[in-house]
Amino acid sequence: MISTSLAQSAYAASSAPVRSDRGTEYAAFQTVTTKLNKATQPDASMTARAEALHENRKLWTILASDLADDGNALPQTLRAQLFYLAEFSLLQSRKALDDPTALKALVDINTSVMRGLAGQGDVK
């Protein structure tokens, strides 16, 4: 009986979803954008805002690094547009530490990228 249970659990379907690269990127933006949205709330602490901004900066730094890689298969124009958004997001993240209203621009940018990843429109 125990060996049957072990075999069933070993060959059972994984509970973790299999994601495409786009799906993984979308999930990363969704997680960070949710944190940024929570940080815009009037009762959000400075710690919550700093954590959300740190996560956003990490995400955009990783993305910028990938965009700069010669092996990136995205069209050059799209890479340039996304790299510009990465630069802007990093600068805006610094501003948002002092000015919580600057978070809205970051949420808007991330939401736009998420729409592009979901195929709901162009990323600009």
Image: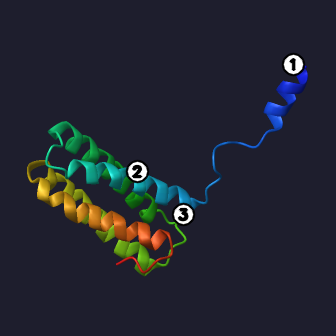
Q: Nearer the viewer, mark 1 or mark 2?
A: 1
Query: Comparing marks 2 and 3, which lies closer to the viewer?
Result: 2
What is the number of the mark on residue 22? 3
Q: How would you rate the neighbour count of disc 3 (Cα within 10 Å): few for under 14, some for 14-19, many for 20 or more? A: some
- Tally of numbered discs: 3
Q: Tell me which label, 1 or 3, sits earlier in the chain.
A: 1
Q: Is mark 3 on a helix, strand or loop?
A: helix
Which comes before the other along the chain, label 2 or label 3? 3
In x, y percent, where is residue 115? Answer: 43, 71
**Residue 115 falls left or right of residue 88:** right
Secondary structure at badge 1 equals helix
The N terminus: image quadrant: top right
Quarter placement of the C terminus: bottom left
Q: Which residue is drawn at 71% across and 42% down?
A: 14
Q: Which residue lies at the image location 20% right of the left edge and 62% below the top edge?
A: 104
Q: Quadrant of residue 4?
A: top right
Q: What residue type is labelled 3?
A: Arg
Question: Disc 2 residue type?
Answer: Thr
- Name the residue carrying label 2: 31
Q: Which of marks 1 and 2 is nearer the N terminus?
A: 1
Instruction: Answer above or below: position of 104 versus 123.
Output: above
Identify which residue is drawn at 39% across, 76% down.
123
- For the residues bearing labels 1 and 3, Cβ distance under 8 angstroms: no
Of 4 and 23, which appears nearest the observer?
Answer: 4
State which mark lies toward you, 1 or 3: 1
- Image vertical order of residue 76 relative to residue 33, above or below: below
Q: Mark 1 points at which residue?
A: 2
| Amino acid beneath label 1 | Ile
The spot of residue 101 in percent (x, y) is 12, 58
SS under mark 2: helix
x%, y% of residue 17?
63, 50
